[in-house]
Protein backbone atom coordinates (compact mmCIF):
# COMPACT_ATOMS: atom_id res chain seq x y z
CA UNK A 1 0.00 0.00 0.00
CA UNK A 2 1.35 3.43 -0.92
CA UNK A 3 2.05 6.03 1.76
CA UNK A 4 -0.67 8.34 0.42
CA UNK A 5 -3.21 5.51 0.55
CA UNK A 6 -2.15 4.80 4.14
CA UNK A 7 -2.56 8.43 5.10
CA UNK A 8 -6.06 8.45 3.60
CA UNK A 9 -6.91 5.36 5.62
CA UNK A 10 -5.59 6.81 8.87
CA UNK A 11 -7.26 10.17 8.38
CA UNK A 12 -10.46 10.40 10.45
CA UNK A 13 -11.57 13.69 8.90
CA UNK A 14 -14.20 12.94 6.25
CA UNK A 15 -13.58 16.22 4.43
CA UNK A 16 -9.84 15.82 4.10
CA UNK A 17 -10.26 12.16 3.14
CA UNK A 18 -12.65 13.17 0.36
CA UNK A 19 -10.26 15.91 -0.80
CA UNK A 20 -7.27 13.59 -0.78
CA UNK A 21 -9.07 10.81 -2.65
CA UNK A 22 -10.49 13.17 -5.29
CA UNK A 23 -9.03 16.63 -5.87
CA UNK A 24 -5.51 15.77 -4.75
CA UNK A 25 -5.30 12.80 -7.10
CA UNK A 26 -5.28 15.18 -10.07
CA UNK A 27 -3.08 18.01 -11.21
CA UNK A 28 -4.70 21.02 -12.97
CA UNK A 29 -2.89 19.82 -16.11
CA UNK A 30 -4.72 16.48 -15.86
CA UNK A 31 -8.12 18.15 -15.61
CA UNK A 32 -7.64 20.83 -18.28
CA UNK A 33 -4.70 19.66 -20.39
CA UNK A 34 -2.99 21.82 -23.00
CA UNK A 35 -0.95 18.90 -24.29
CA UNK A 36 -1.45 15.18 -24.80
CA UNK A 37 0.84 12.19 -25.27
CA UNK A 38 2.07 12.16 -28.86
CA UNK A 39 0.21 8.90 -29.60
CA UNK A 40 -3.16 10.63 -29.10
CA UNK A 41 -3.44 11.31 -32.82
CA UNK A 42 -6.36 9.49 -34.41
CA UNK A 43 -9.91 10.28 -35.49
CA UNK A 44 -11.17 7.65 -33.04
CA UNK A 45 -10.47 10.06 -30.16
CA UNK A 46 -13.01 12.52 -31.55
CA UNK A 47 -15.96 10.23 -30.79
CA UNK A 48 -15.67 10.56 -27.01
CA UNK A 49 -15.95 14.33 -27.10
CA UNK A 50 -18.67 14.12 -29.77
CA UNK A 51 -20.67 11.87 -27.43
CA UNK A 52 -20.36 14.46 -24.65
CA UNK A 53 -21.29 17.25 -27.08
CA UNK A 54 -24.40 15.26 -28.10
CA UNK A 55 -25.30 14.80 -24.44
CA UNK A 56 -25.01 18.57 -23.92
CA UNK A 57 -27.25 19.11 -26.96
CA UNK A 58 -29.76 16.62 -25.53
CA UNK A 59 -29.80 18.43 -22.20
CA UNK A 60 -30.18 21.83 -23.87
CA UNK A 61 -33.01 20.81 -26.23
CA UNK A 62 -34.61 18.81 -23.42
CA UNK A 63 -34.59 21.85 -21.15
CA UNK A 64 -36.19 23.94 -23.89
CA UNK A 65 -38.92 21.30 -24.34
CA UNK A 66 -39.37 21.20 -20.55
CA UNK A 67 -40.10 24.94 -20.43
CA UNK A 68 -43.30 24.56 -22.46
CA UNK A 69 -44.44 21.09 -21.33
CA UNK A 70 -44.95 17.69 -22.98
CA UNK A 71 -47.76 18.76 -25.36
CA UNK A 72 -46.01 21.83 -26.78
CA UNK A 73 -44.28 20.08 -29.66
CA UNK A 74 -47.60 18.73 -31.01
CA UNK A 75 -49.06 22.18 -31.55
CA UNK A 76 -46.09 24.48 -32.22
CA UNK A 77 -43.70 24.41 -35.16
CA UNK A 78 -40.98 25.79 -32.89
CA UNK A 79 -41.71 23.04 -30.37
CA UNK A 80 -41.65 20.44 -33.15
CA UNK A 81 -38.26 21.73 -34.31
CA UNK A 82 -36.79 21.37 -30.83
CA UNK A 83 -38.33 17.90 -30.55
CA UNK A 84 -36.61 17.05 -33.85
CA UNK A 85 -33.33 18.43 -32.48
CA UNK A 86 -33.79 16.27 -29.39
CA UNK A 87 -34.48 13.18 -31.54
CA UNK A 88 -31.53 13.67 -33.88
CA UNK A 89 -29.25 14.50 -30.96
CA UNK A 90 -30.07 11.16 -29.35
CA UNK A 91 -29.47 9.34 -32.64
CA UNK A 92 -26.06 11.05 -32.96
CA UNK A 93 -25.35 10.45 -29.25
CA UNK A 94 -25.71 6.68 -29.63
CA UNK A 95 -23.80 6.49 -32.92
CA UNK A 96 -20.88 8.40 -31.40
CA UNK A 97 -21.04 6.45 -28.15
CA UNK A 98 -21.02 3.05 -29.86
CA UNK A 99 -18.07 4.00 -32.11
CA UNK A 100 -16.28 5.36 -29.01
CA UNK A 101 -17.01 2.12 -27.11
CA UNK A 102 -15.72 -0.19 -29.85
CA UNK A 103 -12.74 2.05 -30.45
CA UNK A 104 -11.84 1.69 -26.78
CA UNK A 105 -12.34 -2.07 -26.99
CA UNK A 106 -9.85 -2.45 -29.85
CA UNK A 107 -7.42 -0.22 -27.95
CA UNK A 108 -7.84 -2.53 -24.89
CA UNK A 109 -8.39 0.73 -23.06
CA UNK A 110 -8.83 -1.01 -19.69
CA UNK A 111 -5.07 -1.56 -19.46
CA UNK A 112 -3.04 0.16 -16.78
CA UNK A 113 -5.65 0.06 -14.00
CA UNK A 114 -8.30 1.65 -16.20
CA UNK A 115 -10.95 -1.05 -15.60
CA UNK A 116 -13.16 1.40 -13.70
CA UNK A 117 -13.08 3.73 -16.69
CA UNK A 118 -14.33 0.91 -18.94
CA UNK A 119 -17.02 -0.16 -16.44
CA UNK A 120 -18.34 3.39 -15.96
CA UNK A 121 -18.46 3.74 -19.76
CA UNK A 122 -20.63 0.62 -20.05
CA UNK A 123 -22.76 1.89 -17.14
CA UNK A 124 -23.26 5.17 -19.00
CA UNK A 125 -24.26 3.22 -22.12
CA UNK A 126 -26.81 1.10 -20.21
CA UNK A 127 -28.39 3.98 -18.30
CA UNK A 128 -28.55 6.02 -21.51
CA UNK A 129 -30.59 3.25 -23.14
CA UNK A 130 -33.10 3.28 -20.26
CA UNK A 131 -33.21 7.09 -20.38
CA UNK A 132 -33.84 7.04 -24.12
CA UNK A 133 -36.65 4.51 -23.67
CA UNK A 134 -38.40 6.81 -21.17
CA UNK A 135 -38.00 9.60 -23.73
CA UNK A 136 -39.80 7.53 -26.34
CA UNK A 137 -42.52 6.79 -23.76
CA UNK A 138 -43.32 10.47 -23.21
CA UNK A 139 -43.83 11.49 -26.82
CA UNK A 140 -47.59 11.39 -26.06
CA UNK A 141 -48.41 10.09 -29.53
CA UNK A 142 -49.18 6.74 -31.18
CA UNK A 143 -45.54 5.63 -31.13
CA UNK A 144 -45.26 6.19 -27.38
CA UNK A 145 -48.54 4.36 -26.77
CA UNK A 146 -47.37 1.35 -28.76
CA UNK A 147 -43.93 1.28 -27.15
CA UNK A 148 -45.53 1.53 -23.70
CA UNK A 149 -47.85 -1.43 -24.31
CA UNK A 150 -45.00 -3.57 -25.68
CA UNK A 151 -42.26 -2.58 -23.21
CA UNK A 152 -44.51 -3.30 -20.24
CA UNK A 153 -44.31 -7.03 -20.99
CA UNK A 154 -40.51 -7.04 -20.78
CA UNK A 155 -40.43 -5.19 -17.47
CA UNK A 156 -43.38 -7.16 -16.05
CA UNK A 157 -41.66 -10.42 -17.02
CA UNK A 158 -38.80 -9.50 -14.67
CA UNK A 159 -41.08 -8.23 -11.89
CA UNK A 160 -39.87 -4.67 -12.50
CA UNK A 161 -43.11 -3.45 -14.08
CA UNK A 162 -44.72 -3.09 -10.68
CA UNK A 163 -42.36 -0.18 -9.97
CA UNK A 164 -41.62 1.12 -13.48
CA UNK A 165 -45.02 1.16 -15.16
CA UNK A 166 -44.46 2.10 -18.80
CA UNK A 167 -48.20 2.83 -19.13
CA UNK A 168 -47.94 5.57 -16.50
CA UNK A 169 -46.98 8.59 -18.60
CA UNK A 170 -46.54 10.84 -15.57
CA UNK A 171 -44.01 8.47 -14.04
CA UNK A 172 -42.11 8.20 -17.34
CA UNK A 173 -41.97 12.01 -17.63
CA UNK A 174 -40.51 12.38 -14.16
CA UNK A 175 -37.98 9.61 -14.76
CA UNK A 176 -36.92 11.07 -18.10
CA UNK A 177 -36.74 14.70 -17.07
CA UNK A 178 -35.55 14.50 -13.47
CA UNK A 179 -34.07 11.25 -12.24
CA UNK A 180 -32.39 9.52 -15.19
CA UNK A 181 -30.54 12.55 -16.64
CA UNK A 182 -29.09 13.03 -13.17
CA UNK A 183 -27.93 9.40 -13.06
CA UNK A 184 -26.46 9.55 -16.59
CA UNK A 185 -24.84 12.91 -15.80
CA UNK A 186 -23.16 11.63 -12.62
CA UNK A 187 -21.87 8.48 -14.36
CA UNK A 188 -20.56 10.46 -17.35
CA UNK A 189 -18.78 12.98 -15.09
CA UNK A 190 -17.29 10.10 -13.10
CA UNK A 191 -16.15 8.48 -16.37
CA UNK A 192 -14.57 11.71 -17.63
CA UNK A 193 -12.76 12.32 -14.34
CA UNK A 194 -11.34 8.79 -14.47
CA UNK A 195 -10.14 9.40 -18.03
CA UNK A 196 -8.50 12.67 -17.01
CA UNK A 197 -6.98 11.15 -13.86
CA UNK A 198 -5.54 8.05 -15.52
CA UNK A 199 -4.64 9.69 -18.81
CA UNK A 200 -5.24 8.27 -22.28
CA UNK A 201 -4.19 4.63 -22.56
CA UNK A 202 -0.92 4.23 -24.49
CA UNK A 203 -0.48 2.07 -27.62
CA UNK A 204 -0.72 -1.67 -27.15
CA UNK A 205 2.60 -3.15 -28.22
CA UNK A 206 5.69 -3.03 -26.05
CA UNK A 207 3.63 -2.82 -22.90
CA UNK A 208 5.56 -3.97 -19.90
CA UNK A 209 2.22 -4.68 -18.22
CA UNK A 210 -0.56 -5.88 -20.46
CA UNK A 211 -4.16 -7.01 -20.28
CA UNK A 212 -6.78 -6.76 -17.60
CA UNK A 213 -5.88 -4.88 -14.51
CA UNK A 214 -7.42 -4.02 -11.19
CA UNK A 215 -9.43 -0.98 -10.25
CA UNK B 1 14.59 2.17 -30.61
CA UNK B 2 11.65 0.34 -29.05
CA UNK B 3 10.11 2.21 -26.16
CA UNK B 4 8.77 0.17 -23.24
CA UNK B 5 5.47 1.56 -22.02
CA UNK B 6 3.83 0.84 -18.70
CA UNK B 7 0.17 1.88 -19.23
CA UNK B 8 -0.42 2.32 -15.49
CA UNK B 9 2.33 4.94 -15.16
CA UNK B 10 1.94 8.59 -16.00
CA UNK B 11 3.12 9.31 -19.55
CA UNK B 12 6.59 10.86 -19.65
CA UNK B 13 7.25 10.50 -23.37
CA UNK B 14 6.78 13.01 -26.17
CA UNK B 15 3.65 15.16 -26.16
CA UNK B 16 1.79 17.24 -28.70
CA UNK B 17 -0.18 20.49 -28.25
CA UNK B 18 -3.82 20.03 -27.31
CA UNK B 19 -6.67 22.42 -26.36
CA UNK B 20 -9.45 20.52 -24.57
CA UNK B 21 -11.76 23.54 -24.32
CA UNK B 22 -11.38 24.40 -28.00
CA UNK B 23 -12.01 20.76 -28.95
CA UNK B 24 -15.15 20.69 -26.77
CA UNK B 25 -16.53 23.90 -28.26
CA UNK B 26 -15.90 22.68 -31.82
CA UNK B 27 -17.60 19.36 -31.00
CA UNK B 28 -20.68 21.15 -29.64
CA UNK B 29 -20.87 23.33 -32.75
CA UNK B 30 -20.50 20.28 -35.04
CA UNK B 31 -23.26 18.39 -33.21
CA UNK B 32 -25.52 21.46 -33.20
CA UNK B 33 -25.06 21.89 -36.95
CA UNK B 34 -25.61 18.17 -37.59
CA UNK B 35 -28.70 17.89 -35.36
CA UNK B 36 -30.09 21.20 -36.63
CA UNK B 37 -29.50 20.24 -40.26
CA UNK B 38 -31.07 16.80 -39.82
CA UNK B 39 -34.04 18.41 -38.04
CA UNK B 40 -34.59 20.90 -40.85
CA UNK B 41 -34.24 18.20 -43.50
CA UNK B 42 -36.13 15.33 -41.92
CA UNK B 43 -38.05 16.79 -38.92
CA UNK B 44 -39.50 14.11 -36.58
CA UNK B 45 -42.57 11.86 -36.72
CA UNK B 46 -45.73 12.57 -34.74
CA UNK B 47 -48.58 10.16 -35.43
CA UNK B 48 -51.54 11.25 -33.38
CA UNK B 49 -52.31 9.27 -30.22
CA UNK B 50 -55.13 6.73 -30.40
CA UNK B 51 -58.08 7.13 -28.02
CA UNK B 52 -60.93 4.83 -27.10
CA UNK B 53 -63.07 7.39 -28.93
CA UNK B 54 -61.11 7.11 -32.18
CA UNK B 55 -60.96 3.32 -31.85
CA UNK B 56 -64.73 2.94 -31.32
CA UNK B 57 -65.55 5.33 -34.16
CA UNK B 58 -63.07 3.86 -36.64
CA UNK B 59 -63.55 0.17 -35.86
CA UNK B 60 -66.69 -0.31 -33.78
CA UNK B 61 -66.80 -4.06 -34.49
CA UNK B 62 -63.32 -4.58 -33.03
CA UNK B 63 -64.21 -2.44 -30.02
CA UNK B 64 -67.33 -4.53 -29.36
CA UNK B 65 -65.43 -7.83 -29.71
CA UNK B 66 -62.71 -6.60 -27.32
CA UNK B 67 -65.20 -5.30 -24.74
CA UNK B 68 -67.06 -8.63 -24.87
CA UNK B 69 -63.72 -10.40 -24.45
CA UNK B 70 -63.07 -8.37 -21.29
CA UNK B 71 -66.39 -9.61 -19.86
CA UNK B 72 -65.64 -13.19 -20.96
CA UNK B 73 -62.16 -13.02 -19.44
CA UNK B 74 -60.48 -13.97 -22.72
CA UNK B 75 -58.39 -10.85 -23.47
CA UNK B 76 -54.69 -10.46 -22.74
CA UNK B 77 -55.36 -8.14 -19.80
CA UNK B 78 -58.04 -10.43 -18.37
CA UNK B 79 -55.57 -13.33 -18.21
CA UNK B 80 -52.38 -11.33 -17.56
CA UNK B 81 -51.51 -11.99 -13.93
CA UNK B 82 -49.07 -9.84 -11.94
CA UNK B 83 -48.73 -6.91 -11.52
CA UNK B 84 -52.37 -6.36 -12.59
CA UNK B 85 -54.36 -9.36 -11.32
CA UNK B 86 -54.18 -13.01 -10.30
CA UNK B 87 -55.62 -14.34 -13.56
CA UNK B 88 -52.39 -15.71 -15.05
CA UNK B 89 -48.93 -16.96 -14.16
CA UNK B 90 -46.87 -14.98 -16.64
CA UNK B 91 -43.54 -16.10 -18.12
CA UNK B 92 -41.00 -18.00 -16.05
CA UNK B 93 -37.25 -18.50 -15.97
CA UNK B 94 -36.90 -22.18 -15.19
CA UNK B 95 -38.42 -22.58 -11.73
CA UNK B 96 -38.37 -18.80 -11.13
CA UNK B 97 -41.63 -16.91 -11.51
CA UNK B 98 -40.07 -13.46 -11.69
CA UNK B 99 -43.29 -11.77 -12.80
CA UNK B 100 -45.02 -12.89 -9.62
CA UNK B 101 -42.38 -11.89 -7.11
CA UNK B 102 -43.99 -8.55 -6.24
CA UNK B 103 -47.57 -9.74 -6.67
CA UNK B 104 -50.49 -7.52 -7.72
CA UNK B 105 -49.10 -3.99 -7.44
CA UNK B 106 -51.23 -2.15 -10.02
CA UNK B 107 -54.68 -3.75 -9.58
CA UNK B 108 -56.68 -3.99 -12.81
CA UNK B 109 -59.85 -6.06 -13.12
CA UNK B 110 -60.63 -5.65 -16.85
CA UNK B 111 -64.30 -6.69 -16.79
CA UNK B 112 -65.13 -4.37 -13.93
CA UNK B 113 -62.65 -1.55 -14.64
CA UNK B 114 -63.12 -1.32 -18.42
CA UNK B 115 -66.84 -2.16 -18.72
CA UNK B 116 -68.95 -2.44 -15.56
CA UNK B 117 -67.75 0.59 -13.55
CA UNK B 118 -67.76 3.01 -16.51
CA UNK B 119 -71.33 1.96 -17.36
CA UNK B 120 -72.44 2.89 -13.86
CA UNK B 121 -71.02 6.39 -14.42
CA UNK B 122 -73.41 6.86 -17.36
CA UNK B 123 -76.48 7.30 -15.18
CA UNK B 124 -78.42 5.55 -17.93
CA UNK B 125 -81.39 3.41 -16.83
CA UNK B 126 -80.88 0.65 -19.42
CA UNK B 127 -77.14 0.42 -18.79
CA UNK B 128 -77.64 0.34 -15.02
CA UNK B 129 -80.31 -2.36 -15.33
CA UNK B 130 -77.99 -4.45 -17.53
CA UNK B 131 -75.18 -4.07 -15.01
CA UNK B 132 -77.52 -5.03 -12.16
CA UNK B 133 -78.45 -8.23 -13.98
CA UNK B 134 -74.75 -8.90 -14.64
CA UNK B 135 -73.76 -8.35 -11.04
CA UNK B 136 -76.57 -10.56 -9.73
CA UNK B 137 -75.40 -13.54 -11.82
CA UNK B 138 -72.81 -16.12 -10.85
CA UNK B 139 -69.33 -15.92 -12.37
CA UNK B 140 -70.07 -19.06 -14.41
CA UNK B 141 -73.25 -17.52 -15.79
CA UNK B 142 -71.47 -14.26 -16.62
CA UNK B 143 -68.75 -16.16 -18.48
CA UNK B 144 -71.34 -18.24 -20.35
CA UNK B 145 -73.24 -15.12 -21.49
CA UNK B 146 -70.14 -13.24 -22.57
CA UNK B 147 -68.53 -16.24 -24.30
CA UNK B 148 -71.73 -17.00 -26.22
CA UNK B 149 -71.95 -13.39 -27.35
CA UNK B 150 -68.28 -13.34 -28.31
CA UNK B 151 -68.85 -16.48 -30.44
CA UNK B 152 -71.89 -14.90 -32.09
CA UNK B 153 -69.99 -11.69 -32.85
CA UNK B 154 -67.14 -13.75 -34.29
CA UNK B 155 -69.53 -15.50 -36.66
CA UNK B 156 -71.34 -12.30 -37.64
CA UNK B 157 -68.61 -11.10 -39.96
CA UNK B 158 -67.94 -7.74 -38.35
CA UNK B 159 -71.31 -6.81 -36.85
CA UNK B 160 -71.42 -4.49 -33.82
CA UNK B 161 -74.39 -6.36 -32.32
CA UNK B 162 -76.15 -9.70 -32.73
CA UNK B 163 -79.80 -10.42 -31.91
CA UNK B 164 -80.31 -12.77 -28.98
CA UNK B 165 -82.66 -15.21 -30.74
CA UNK B 166 -82.04 -18.06 -28.26
CA UNK B 167 -81.89 -15.88 -25.15
CA UNK B 168 -78.31 -16.91 -24.32
CA UNK B 169 -76.43 -13.61 -24.11
CA UNK B 170 -78.06 -12.19 -20.96
CA UNK B 171 -77.33 -8.49 -20.40
CA UNK B 172 -74.06 -8.57 -22.37
CA UNK B 173 -75.33 -7.08 -25.69
CA UNK B 174 -76.94 -4.18 -23.81
CA UNK B 175 -73.80 -3.55 -21.74
CA UNK B 176 -71.47 -3.66 -24.73
CA UNK B 177 -73.79 -1.51 -26.83
CA UNK B 178 -73.99 1.12 -24.07
CA UNK B 179 -70.19 1.02 -23.68
CA UNK B 180 -69.77 1.54 -27.42
CA UNK B 181 -72.03 4.60 -27.29
CA UNK B 182 -70.07 5.91 -24.32
CA UNK B 183 -66.74 5.34 -26.07
CA UNK B 184 -67.88 7.08 -29.27
CA UNK B 185 -68.55 10.29 -27.36
CA UNK B 186 -65.15 10.20 -25.65
CA UNK B 187 -66.72 9.70 -22.23
CA UNK B 188 -65.04 6.30 -21.76
CA UNK B 189 -61.56 7.85 -22.16
CA UNK B 190 -62.38 10.18 -19.30
CA UNK B 191 -64.00 7.45 -17.22
CA UNK B 192 -60.95 5.17 -17.38
CA UNK B 193 -58.38 7.85 -16.66
CA UNK B 194 -60.21 9.83 -13.98
CA UNK B 195 -61.45 6.90 -11.90
CA UNK B 196 -58.74 7.55 -9.32
CA UNK B 197 -57.87 11.23 -9.74
CA UNK B 198 -59.53 14.09 -11.65
CA UNK B 199 -56.21 15.26 -13.13
CA UNK B 200 -54.69 12.04 -14.51
CA UNK B 201 -51.18 11.31 -15.72
CA UNK B 202 -51.56 7.51 -15.56
CA UNK B 203 -52.99 5.85 -18.67
CA UNK B 204 -52.61 2.24 -17.55
CA UNK B 205 -56.29 1.30 -17.90
CA UNK B 206 -57.13 2.81 -21.31
CA UNK B 207 -53.83 1.56 -22.74
CA UNK B 208 -54.37 -1.97 -21.44
CA UNK B 209 -57.88 -1.93 -22.93
CA UNK B 210 -56.54 -0.57 -26.23
CA UNK B 211 -53.73 -3.13 -26.29
CA UNK B 212 -56.33 -5.91 -25.97
CA UNK B 213 -57.63 -4.90 -29.40
CA UNK B 214 -56.43 -7.28 -32.06
CA UNK B 215 -58.11 -5.70 -35.05
CA UNK B 216 -57.27 -2.02 -34.61
CA UNK B 217 -54.34 -1.03 -32.40
CA UNK B 218 -52.15 -3.99 -33.41
CA UNK B 219 -53.10 -3.49 -37.07
CA UNK B 220 -52.03 0.15 -36.92
CA UNK B 221 -48.69 -0.89 -35.41
CA UNK B 222 -48.18 -3.62 -37.99
CA UNK B 223 -48.74 -1.14 -40.83
CA UNK B 224 -46.02 1.01 -39.27
CA UNK B 225 -43.67 -2.02 -39.01
CA UNK B 226 -43.76 -1.83 -35.21
CA UNK B 227 -44.82 -5.39 -34.40
CA UNK B 228 -42.49 -7.67 -32.49
CA UNK B 229 -41.90 -9.92 -35.51
CA UNK B 230 -40.99 -6.83 -37.58
CA UNK B 231 -38.12 -5.81 -35.26
CA UNK B 232 -40.65 -3.34 -33.89
CA UNK B 233 -38.74 -2.66 -30.66
CA UNK B 234 -36.11 -0.69 -32.56
CA UNK B 235 -38.41 0.90 -35.15
CA UNK B 236 -40.12 4.26 -35.33
CA UNK B 237 -43.31 5.20 -37.16
CA UNK B 238 -42.76 6.12 -40.81
CA UNK B 239 -39.20 5.99 -42.12
CA UNK B 240 -37.47 7.68 -39.20
CA UNK B 241 -34.77 5.86 -37.27
CA UNK B 242 -36.01 4.54 -33.94
CA UNK B 243 -34.16 3.04 -31.03
CA UNK B 244 -31.63 1.32 -33.27
CA UNK B 245 -29.42 0.69 -30.22
CA UNK B 246 -32.00 -1.95 -29.22
CA UNK B 247 -31.17 -4.05 -32.31
CA UNK B 248 -29.74 -6.94 -30.30
CA UNK B 249 -32.72 -6.92 -27.95
CA UNK B 250 -35.02 -7.01 -30.98
CA UNK B 251 -32.92 -9.67 -32.70
CA UNK B 252 -33.56 -12.36 -30.06
CA UNK B 253 -37.31 -12.12 -30.65
CA UNK B 254 -36.75 -13.06 -34.32
CA UNK B 255 -34.91 -16.36 -33.64
CA UNK B 256 -35.59 -19.64 -31.90
CA UNK B 257 -35.91 -20.66 -29.13
CA UNK B 258 -37.12 -17.20 -28.11
CA UNK B 259 -39.40 -16.60 -31.10
CA UNK B 260 -41.92 -19.30 -30.20
CA UNK B 261 -41.36 -19.40 -26.44
CA UNK B 262 -44.10 -18.38 -24.07
CA UNK B 263 -41.32 -17.20 -21.77
CA UNK B 264 -39.63 -15.04 -24.43
CA UNK B 265 -39.86 -11.79 -22.45
CA UNK B 266 -38.17 -13.23 -19.37
CA UNK B 267 -35.57 -15.10 -21.42
CA UNK B 268 -34.65 -12.10 -23.59
CA UNK B 269 -34.56 -9.65 -20.68
CA UNK B 270 -32.36 -12.04 -18.67
CA UNK B 271 -30.06 -12.67 -21.62
CA UNK B 272 -29.67 -8.96 -22.34
CA UNK B 273 -28.96 -8.31 -18.68
CA UNK B 274 -26.22 -10.95 -18.71
CA UNK B 275 -24.76 -9.66 -21.99
CA UNK B 276 -24.65 -6.10 -20.63
CA UNK B 277 -22.95 -7.35 -17.48
CA UNK B 278 -20.49 -9.28 -19.65
CA UNK B 279 -19.71 -6.14 -21.66
CA UNK B 280 -18.87 -4.34 -18.41
CA UNK B 281 -16.66 -7.25 -17.38
CA UNK B 282 -14.80 -7.64 -20.70
CA UNK B 283 -11.47 -6.72 -19.05
CA UNK B 284 -11.80 -9.80 -16.83
CA UNK B 285 -12.54 -12.37 -19.56
CA UNK B 286 -9.21 -13.93 -20.64
CA UNK B 287 -10.21 -14.68 -24.25
CA UNK B 288 -12.08 -11.45 -24.89
CA UNK B 289 -9.44 -9.19 -23.37
CA UNK B 290 -6.83 -10.73 -25.65
CA UNK B 291 -8.84 -10.05 -28.83
CA UNK B 292 -7.45 -6.52 -29.31
CA UNK B 293 -3.98 -8.10 -29.36
CA UNK B 294 -4.96 -10.89 -31.77
CA UNK B 295 -6.89 -8.67 -34.19
CA UNK B 296 -4.62 -5.67 -34.65
CA UNK B 297 -7.14 -2.91 -35.30
CA UNK B 298 -5.04 -0.85 -32.89
CA UNK B 299 -2.43 -0.76 -35.68
CA UNK B 300 -4.84 1.46 -37.63
CA UNK B 301 -5.75 3.58 -34.62
CA UNK B 302 -2.15 4.30 -33.65
CA UNK B 303 -0.79 4.17 -37.22
CA UNK B 304 1.03 7.49 -36.87
CA UNK B 305 2.60 6.50 -33.59
CA UNK B 306 3.88 3.17 -34.88
CA UNK B 307 5.21 4.83 -38.06
CA UNK B 308 6.98 7.41 -35.89
CA UNK B 309 8.76 4.73 -33.89
CA UNK B 310 10.06 3.06 -37.00
Image (cartoon, coloured by chain):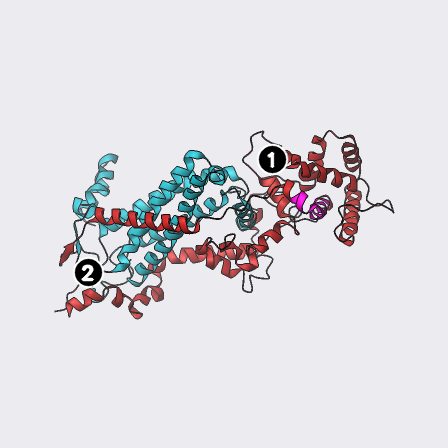
Magenta segment's dominant SS is helix
Which one is in front, B128 or B53? Answer: B53
Left or right: where does residue A17 sit relative to residue B210? Answer: left
| Residue A61 % position (x, y) | 38, 41
**Classed neighbour count for the residue bearing mark 1: other residues with Cα under 10 Å, few (<14), some (14–19), many (≥20):** some
Name the colour assigned to chain A in the rendering.
cyan
| Residue A114 % position (x, y) | 27, 55
A120 to A59, vertically: above or below: below
The tag on residue A206 is none
Q: Which residue is mark 2?
A: A39
**Residue extending furthest right?**
B166
**Quadrant assignment, res B116:** top right
Q: Residue at x 23, y 52 (%)?
A: A198
Left or right: where does residue B20 sit relative to residue B118? Answer: left
The tag on residue B193 is 1
Q: Are marks 1 and 2 on the same chain?
A: no
Question: Could one spot residue B90 in this view of the protein?
Answer: no
Name the colour assigned to chain B in the rendering.
red
User: Which chain does the residue under circle 1 lie in?
Assistant: B
**Classed neighbour count for the residue bearing mark 2: other residues with Cα under 10 Å, few (<14), some (14–19), many (≥20):** many
Which one is in front, B306 or B103? Answer: B306
Q: Which residues are magenta?
A: B55-69
Q: Is residue B60 magenta?
A: yes
Q: Residue at x 70, y 41 (%)?
A: B111
User: Which chain does the residue under circle 2 lie in?
Assistant: A
Q: In terms of secondary structure, where does tag 2 sit?
A: loop
Q: Are marks 1 and 2 in contact (CB under 8 Å)?
A: no
| Residue B40 % position (x, y) | 40, 48
Question: Could one spot residue B278 in this view of the protein?
Answer: yes
Q: Looking at the image, how many numbered discs can be counted on the residues?
A: 2
Amino acid sequence: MSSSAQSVKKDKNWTSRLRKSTLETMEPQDLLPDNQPAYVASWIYVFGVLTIASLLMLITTGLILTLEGPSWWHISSVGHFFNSMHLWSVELFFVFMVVHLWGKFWMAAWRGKRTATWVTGVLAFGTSIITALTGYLIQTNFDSQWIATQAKDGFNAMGIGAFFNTLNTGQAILLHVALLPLVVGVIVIWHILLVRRKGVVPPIDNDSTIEGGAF
Amino acid sequence: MVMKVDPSKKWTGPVRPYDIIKEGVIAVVVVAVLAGGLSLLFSSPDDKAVTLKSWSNNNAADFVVTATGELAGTTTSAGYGAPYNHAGNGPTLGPLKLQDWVGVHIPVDPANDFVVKPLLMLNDGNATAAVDTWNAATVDQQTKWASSYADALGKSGGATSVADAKNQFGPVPGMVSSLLGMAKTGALDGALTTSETPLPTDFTKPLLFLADSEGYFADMASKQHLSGDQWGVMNETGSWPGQSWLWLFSFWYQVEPFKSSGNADTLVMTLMGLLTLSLALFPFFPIIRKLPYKIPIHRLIWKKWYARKL
